[in-house]
Amino acid sequence: MGKRILILDDDSDFNNLLTDIFSQADYEVVSEQDPEKAVELFRGDEFDLVVTDQKMPGLTGEEFIREIKRLRPEIPVIMVSGYLDNDTIRNLIREGVGGVFLKPLNVFSLLKRTSALIESSQNDAERQATGQGTTETDAGEFEHGLSFSFESYPCRASASLEFAKKLYGLRGFKNNLVLIGEDGTDLASLLEDIRGFDEQSGEAFASLELSQLNEATLLETVKEAQQAGANRLTLMISRPDQMDYDQTENVYAAARKKGPFLAYSLPVRYIFFVNEDIDTLYDSGRVDDNLYMFFGTSEARVPPLREIRDDLPLIARREVASEAARLQLDSVPSLLAPAASFLREREWSSGMLGFKRVVRAAVAESKGDPISRELLEKICANANASRTEEAGNLKHMLQMRRDDYLKAVYRLSGNQVDLTAEVLGVDASMVDATVSPASDPSAKEGKS
């Protein structure tokens, strides 16, 4: 028999529907229409997950959840309701609800979320039973059962586990390796893991920005590695699709021992990080034939944060411990359960680096106190406001540059509005408004 689910809904028809859905998915279902009786059932029996409605006589769904969370906080809960306002949804997530679904129901999404929550809960229980559990305050050991060291992700999520295995399998790449991922990927951490796959190899590793891909810097990097006794140099380069001609030629020369690199016998290989697969880059014309062939065929996709949500709380706790040590706090802040839920559920458009920046900011603001969901929400809101302000400043700066350019063309045209408009391909009224005395008292002397 499958895992056991408790269903609470006072609507008998919908209760029966949910019972049928979960029963057909091989779950053992116990259903109840009375919230208080459901609490007693939960108190005296074992369940792997609870599904509840919100509006019911006696207790609301929120009140029911608080009751059962006091009894067994580790049991995942899903809310299914006909209508929930945004404030209620936020409160439910703060209470640790793992999924919120509105009617009409998406059965596939419901079953998928159910499976994920039960699997995550079971994994947590197994780690606790084997002494591998992570408290709210410790950094957490990334005990993922792999035969090699891997510190970038704890690999609780299947996507990160498969990525770790694939990256390790590609460790012996001869020439080049392509990593495909989103902006904000923690490349430094990945490079350290690749370095650690074979620490006895005597290989040198370095990461270079595009601005450093000049002949002098590349030569110095190769020279230093060879003088240090390295038997090979691995260079990580982000966004090679944005390299100019000279940078690309320098990259080729270092690998092929051409020109000044002929003086050094040290083999050079590259790890290239791009945002799209190389076929897409090639088809769109952002990578030419030579670079496309140079990339080779060894590639791995770095999973985005939305695919490794189960890893995020443990990554956060490790980051909390690290930042607390750096700040020399008297104690390591604990990460409260609602805060961990927030980290797991949020969409992190700024990637792993943005995720870690938020966690470090929370440690600094907490001053050793527990990190709450409210604190994380405030930090993210402030970061969004800052980005909006920066975008506004950039827009203003660009507008000023545009106006300066327009005024320069206006003066070169002999202060002729129509000619300026024709040269720039804009409307004459725009030129007139930009060079008017109100805009620049010294600009306008006449009009054609």
Image (cartoon, helix red, strand yellow):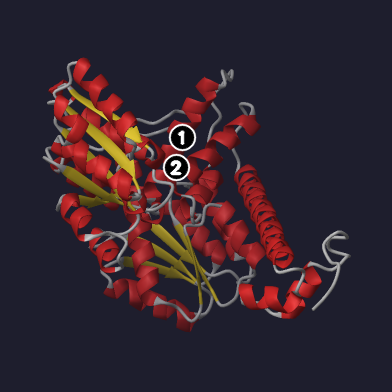
Residue 300 is left or right of residue 21, and the answer is: left
Which residue appears farthest toward the bottom when viewing the image? 13
Q: Is residue 142 visible?
A: no
Image quarter of the C terminus: bottom right
Q: Quadrant of residue 313?
A: top left
Residue nearest the observer in this picture, 339 or 219 = 219
Q: Is residue 273 above or below residue 204?
A: below
Q: Is residue 386 visible?
A: yes
Q: Position of residue 373 (x, y in %)?
A: 60, 46
Residue nearest the observer in this picture, 370 or 265 = 265
Residue at the (41%, 77%) spot, across then down: 106
Q: Amino acid at mark 1?
A: Arg
Tell me the SS state at disc 2: helix
Q: Position of residue 84 (x, y in %)?
A: 61, 71
Checking the image for residue 317, the label placed there is 1
Q: Residues within 10 Å of mark 1 (few under 14, many from 20)?
A: many
Which residue appears farthest toward the top when viewing the image? 228
Checking the image for residue 333, the label placed there is none
Q: Amino acid at mark 2?
A: Pro
Q: Quadrant of residue 284?
A: bottom left
Q: Is residue 321 above or below residue 445?
A: above
Q: Quadrant of residue 428?
A: bottom right
Tell me the SS state at disc 1: helix
Instruction: Please say if the residues under marks 1 and 2 sit with CB atoms less than 8 Å apart.
Output: yes
Q: Rounded to the nearest whole Å, what is the CA distance between mark 1 and mark 2?
A: 6 Å
Q: Is residue 249 above or below residue 291?
A: above
Residue 20 is left or right of residue 299, and the answer is: right
Q: Position of residue 142 (x, y in %)?
A: 32, 34
Residue behind mark 2: 313
